Image (cartoon, rainbow, N blue to C red):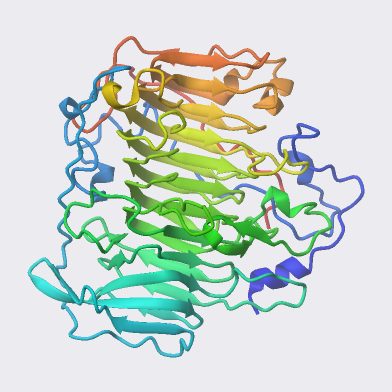
């Protein structure tokens, strides 16, 4: 039986004096810590996460001699500063031109599809429509995989894999009861593996199981559609990637008394959720997800990567989402940390969180040049409620540092009044932003919906929420739209933007800030 599941069913009633963390009381963090409690829940952010306390604004160090984001698809981001216009309400100058030729150095193409032993609920066969693909001077067999992984398996790099319909890793997306036993298998994906997936397909890594997808800068693991194999210029060619876990989601209810949780995931991905923020769904490192976001039969559009109650035991580092119809990445509760994100050509929100997400994010390069419905593609869209009323239990409260977001929309296509916001806070969300640069065709750098947003910070600081925005610099249509009664005057307006060819901001100069997680609450085990 999965260790996390054993942990879940051992949850006991907390001491009566333990106050719930959440929006009703506007308590931020430490209310969950009680040394006399016999409970085993964990609603904390990662107590071991260490931010780099950078002295520059944005995702790129001006002193760096190499580009950390060079693992991403070439042509999906500007190669020089001259390729993109950082002015607001501009004509739009950046035109992506992705020409990705994966390096298959050291990989010898197989002549047939491998068997995945022990996985009786899985089908593997050579594609009848696209039997082979030529990559880097070799011909690779295209192997379609469908069904559910139930035993440990490896997707090797010597064939091209192609998912058909929804492929489950484990069975943890079924409904959970106090006597449920889910599999705890591990799916390993080798460096350099190419997954060219069929229309409507998706991969769901279910709670209790893990994906270990660790590429390299030279040989990233690439999830794409099968329709095109050269320019990666389309979108909605397949569904997307979903990671699910046992971490806390604020619709799971009272973490002091509940023992199991079944939240329904978007994209018909099944159930997720639990009460252990230290849970691990595996590793995504040097992974590219492109051409995804297809609308499925139930009306849902999948995000590039959906993180559904994913815990901080998971590693997310050097990950790109490119040309996704829905959000680039969305965090549904949980506490997973993410570093070195590249989000390019996203048609909806780039980074979206809701339902009690309390993770940490550092280093994100965001380049916007298209839009789904012209008015809602925000750089960050953040709330606590999600699809339900604001939670009684836990607010969303991540800490975000070192972001460069550049929007370069065509005025002729989108119009000056049909562009999204930078930091769009709504429905009770908290959040801390440090050393962040937001420039270009963005309506408001910071948008504060009402007094439910950043309310914990405001109550602790006599109505000021300045401490939630530290070294945030904006060159946008407007710096701030504040519909709350709180004071916010710490956001900086740029009269001009100076980018190097590595997309580092060079004119602001050195800054100081102590960057640390806002939501370590003492419940971490």
**Residue drawn at the location 21% of the way across and 31% of the way down:** 94
Where, by quadrant of the figure, is residue 238 drawn? Answer: bottom left
Q: Is residue 454 visible?
A: yes
Q: Which residue is located at x 63 percent, y 71 percent? A: 174
Residue at the far left in the pictured view: 137
> Is the residue 6 above or below the residue 265 in the image?
below
From this view, report whether residue 488 is shown above or below residue 426: above
- The residue lying toward the viewer, choosing from 269 and 66, is 269
Residue closest to the eye, 58 or 211: 211
- Quadrant in which the N terminus appears: bottom right
User: For this rendering, which residue is in front, 379 or 124?
Assistant: 124
Does residue 51 show up? no
Q: Which image quadrant for residue 443?
A: top left
Residue 234: give x, y in percent of width and height.
26, 50
Residue 465 place in picture, x, y as percent: 62, 20
The residue sitting at the top extreme is 495
Callout count: 0
Q: Quadrant of the C terminus?
A: bottom right
In terms of depth relative to the viewer, which is nearer, 329 or 314? 329
Q: Is residue 198 above or below residue 413?
A: below
Q: Position of residue 199 (x, y in %)?
A: 35, 63
- Judge whether 313 appears above or below 497 on screen: below
Q: Position of residue 212 (x, y in %)?
A: 42, 68
Q: Residue furthest right?
A: 16
| Residue name at image x 62 percent, y 62 percent | 272
């Amino acid at each position: 039986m999965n260790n996390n599941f054993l942990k879940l069913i051992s949850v006991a009633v907390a001491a009566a004096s333990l106050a719930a963390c959440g929006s009703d009381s506007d308590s931020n963090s430490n209310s969950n810590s009680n040394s006399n409690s016999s409970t085993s829940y964990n609603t904390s952010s990662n107590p071991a996460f260490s931010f780099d306390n950078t002295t520059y604004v944005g995702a790129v160090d001006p002193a760096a001699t190499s580009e950390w984001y060079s693992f991403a698809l070439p042509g999906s981001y500007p190669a020089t500063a001259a390729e993109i216009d950082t002015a607001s309400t501009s004509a739009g100058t950046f035109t992506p031109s992705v020409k990705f030729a994966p390096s298959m150095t050291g990989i010898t193409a197989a002549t047939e599809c491998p068997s995945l032993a022990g996985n009786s609920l899985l089908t593997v066969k050579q594609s009848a429509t696209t039997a082979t693909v030529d990559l880097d001077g070799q011909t690779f067999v295209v192997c379609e995989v469908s069904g559910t992984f139930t035993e440990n398996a490896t997707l090797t790099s010597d064939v091209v894999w192609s998912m058909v319909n929804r492929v489950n890793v484990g069975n943890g997306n079924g409904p959970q009861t106090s006597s449920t036993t889910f599999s705890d298998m591990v799916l390993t994906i080798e460096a350099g593996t190419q997954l060219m997936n069929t229309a409507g397909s998706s991969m769901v890594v279910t709670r209790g199981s893990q994906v270990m997808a660790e590429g390299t800068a030279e040989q990233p693991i690439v999830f794409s559609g099968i329709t095109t194999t050269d320019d990666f210029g389309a979108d909605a060619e397949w569904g997307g990637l979903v990671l699910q876990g046992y971490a806390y989601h604020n619709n799971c209810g009272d973490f002091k008394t509940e023992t199991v949780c079944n939240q329904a995931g978007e994209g018909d991905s099944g159930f997720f959720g639990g009460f252990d923020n230290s849970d691990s769904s595996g590793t995504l490192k040097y992974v590219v997800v492109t051409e995804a976001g297809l609308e499925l039969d139930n009306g849902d559009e999948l995000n590039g990567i959906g993180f559904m109650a994913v815990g901080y035991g998971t590693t997310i580092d050097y990950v790109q989402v490119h040309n996704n119809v829905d959000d680039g990445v969305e965090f549904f509760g949980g506490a997973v940390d993410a570093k070195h994100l590249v989000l390019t050509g996203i048609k909806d929100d780039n980074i979206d969180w809701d339902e009690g997400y309390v993770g940490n994010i550092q280093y994100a390069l965001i380049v916007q040049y298209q839009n789904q419905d012209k008015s809602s593609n925000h750089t960050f869209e953040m709330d606590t409620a999600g699809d339900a009323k604001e939670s009684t239990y836990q607010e969303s409260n991540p800490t975000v540092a070192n972001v460069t977001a550049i929007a370069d929309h065509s005025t002729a296509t989108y119009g000056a009044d049909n562009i999204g916001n930078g930091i769009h806070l709504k429905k009770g969300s908290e959040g801390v932003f440090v050393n962040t640069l937001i420039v270009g065709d963005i309506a408001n750098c910071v948008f504060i919906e009402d007094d439910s947003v950043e309310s914990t910070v405001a109550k602790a600081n006599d109505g000021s929420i300045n401490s939630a925005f530290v070294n945030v610099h904006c060159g946008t249509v407007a710096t701030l739209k504040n519909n709350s009664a709180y004071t916010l005057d710490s956001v900086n307006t740029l009269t001009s933007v100076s980018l190097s060819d590595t997309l580092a901001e060079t004119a602001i100069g050195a800054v100081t800030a102590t960057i640390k997680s806002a939501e370590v609450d003492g419940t971490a085990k």
